[in-house]
Structure formats: structure tokens, C-alpha cells
Amino acid sequence: MEHFLGRWREHGLPWPEWMEVTERVREAFARVIRAQPHEVAIMPNASEGAFQVASTLCWERRPGIVTCDMEFPSVAHVWLAQRSRSARIEYAPERDGLVEPEDYVRLVDEQTGLVSVPPVSYRNGSRLPVEEVTRRAREVGARVFVDAYQAAGVLPVDVRRLDCDYLVAGTSKYLLGAPGLAFLYVRGGLVQDRDPQLTGWFGRGEPFAFEPRRLDFPAEARRYETGTPAIPAACASVAGMSLIEELDPGRVTAHVAELADELTEDLRRAGETLYSPLVPERRGPMVAVAAEHPEDLGAFLAGQGVVASPRGRAVRLSLHYYNDSDDLARARDAIRAYRGRATG
């Protein structure tokens, strides 16, 4: 970031350098999800990525969009907005913080145009049945959209294995970047679809041609891009993802799983009710503590130096490779102090 600020101060708008940074961050994300750079579009956020996908699909022939109650609202709202274009939304229900494969699969049929399934829910860290859902979607010819924001950087995210058509993720969580930058993976670029309805000069084959009467969409995922990307966020995110790439992904996943197991058991022994899954195989990189007043608990934890997120009826604690048992103890002690204050 210091280099970025210095070059900006000295050279105004050093576009060649900035374009190099955007390509580096594109390539870094492609490596993280096992994609090719030409399959990755740079977005300002996951919401815009979801909208770009929706805008290229025709709902008249296959109006069904299958999602679930554990979908992040920012994405879910994009699907709801498609009702004005004849889409019909169906939800796989949550059952005690989990979404079962059969509840998704039974909703996917020949009328389904798009299936949206996150690998990990933002609410409580529960893992969702992406591969089972994708297999069913393939059987009936439906497209698959995956929001991997809560997984990329700590869990394996391989678009070939997931067999999804689209995937979004952003840099301000487990990828250790800055807000204002996200990515949209599009299988092979999917250039046979309708053109995106939101566009801009970075969605052109030659952005610096500056031709206002020509709309040339490149034959790759860049066709989904719009205006100028957030260059400061790109600089920070290149650095963050370089740290991710230095680590053994298997060690990261195993370490985070061990922390989640330890925190889950510690909190259960302390008498806490958890909203996150108790079965390790169903649990992602988060532990969610049930709370009558989540915002109050979240504010108390923040005052104790514990970063947590109130989500629905729980407070979510997110874990990464840099966390250790001391961090878990600090969180556990802060929760105990909050309960003691409430009963004292």
C-alpha cells in the first residue's frame, strides 16, 4: 500500500502499473480456486457478481431459482429481484442450523434455471451439500452458482471438483485482503449467454480504445466487468493472497478445524448453546454462540478485544490460520464474563 500511495502521489494515474496489479490479483484468485485467469472477472463485490450472472440468464423457459435460507442476503436479494423478470424462487429449508441435501435436490427439476448454494453459511458456519446439489443440477441441465466468500482462503475451493458454472468470493474475509474487491468465476467464460446488462469500460475487449459507439464484449469472463476496479484494494489483496499461497492449504484447513473443534467443546462444557453444527464434518471455519441479545453480546466481546459478528439469533466467531488456543481462551473468558454480568 505504501508503494501504491507513493506512485499515485508521484505519477498521478499510473495506469500501466495499475493494470498489472489487477491482472496479478486476477491470477492469484484463479490459482486459489483452481481456475484459469480468463475465467475470472474482477468485481467490486459479490452482489454485483450475482447480478451479472442473473442478467445473462433468461427465465421464461426455465423460471426456477433454487436457493436456501442460509444464503447470504446480499446474494439472495439479487435472486428475489429476478421475480420482475418472471423468475420463481424456491427455498431449501434450514433445519436446526443445517440444510440437508435431499431438501435441495427435491426442488431441482427441468424448470430450474439456476441453483444457488454456498459451501459455508454466513450465519453459523454450517457446510452445505454443494457437490450433491451440483450433481442433481447436471442431471436436469440447470446452472449452478456458488458463493464461496465464507470458504475461500481456509477451506479447499476447487471449481473443477465443485463442477459449478459460477462462483463468487471476495477479499475482505479469509483471503486477507481489503473491502471493495471481489471475483466472479465463469466456467469457460460462458460467452454463449446473453450479454451482461451492467457494463463499463473494463468490460470491453480494448478498454483504452475509448470508443463510445462500440460495445465489444471480450470472449472471456472479463466481459462481466464494469467500471474502474478498486486499485487500493487490489494492491492489498495481492499481498494478502500471496500469504495464503505460501501456506499448505491442507495445514490451514486442518488447523482451523482443530480450533473449531476445541472452541466447540470448550463452549459446550461451559454450558453454552451453539447454533453452529456439533458434527465436525458439517462445520466450517466458524463457531456460533446462541444469544438472546446477539448485538449486546457482540458489543461486549468487542470491548474485550474479541472480534465477533452478531448474525440472526447468534454471535459468530470466525477462525483462521493465524488464530491459536490463546485466542480461543480469550473468547471463552469474555463470553463467561458476559454471562456473569447478565446474572450478577
Image (spheres, rainbow, N blue to C red):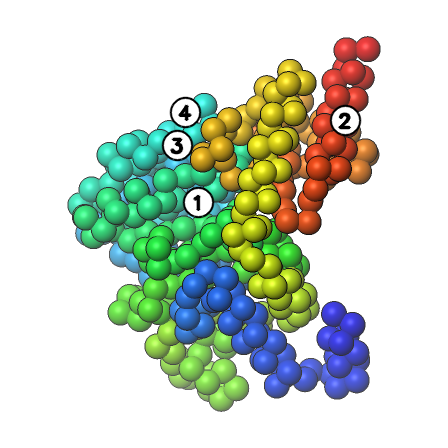
Q: Secondary structure at mark 4?
A: loop
Of the numbered discs 4 and 1, the one sitting upstream in the chain is 4
Relative to residue 248, is residue 104 depicted above or below?
above
Three-letter amino acid code at the position of disc 4: Arg
- Residue on which the image places disc 3: 99
Label 2 – label 1 distance at C-alpha: 30 Å
Q: Are marks 4 and 3 in contact (CB under 8 Å)?
A: yes
Relative to residue 191, is residue 96 depicted above or below?
above
Q: Quadrant of residue 8?
A: bottom right
- Viewer-side residue, 156 vs 105: 156
Q: Secondary structure at mark 2?
A: helix
Q: Is residue 117 left or right of residue 311?
A: left
Three-letter amino acid code at the position of disc 2: Asp
Question: How busy is the neighbourhood of tag 2: few (under 14 within 10 Å), some, or many (20 plus)?
Answer: some
Task: Give the numbered dot on residue 333.
Answer: 2
Q: Are marks 4 and 1 in contact (CB under 8 Å)?
A: no
- Of circles 2 and 4, the one toward us is 2
Task: Give the numbered dot on residue 119.
Answer: 1
Q: Is residue 236 left or right of residue 161?
A: right
Three-letter amino acid code at the position of disc 3: Val
Label 3 – label 2 distance at C-alpha: 31 Å
Three-letter amino acid code at the position of disc 1: Pro
Question: How busy is the neighbourhood of tag 3: few (under 14 within 10 Å), some, or many (20 plus)?
Answer: many
Of the numbered discs 2 and 4, the one sitting upstream in the chain is 4
- Residue on which the image places disc 4: 95
Of the numbered discs 3 and 2, the one sitting upstream in the chain is 3
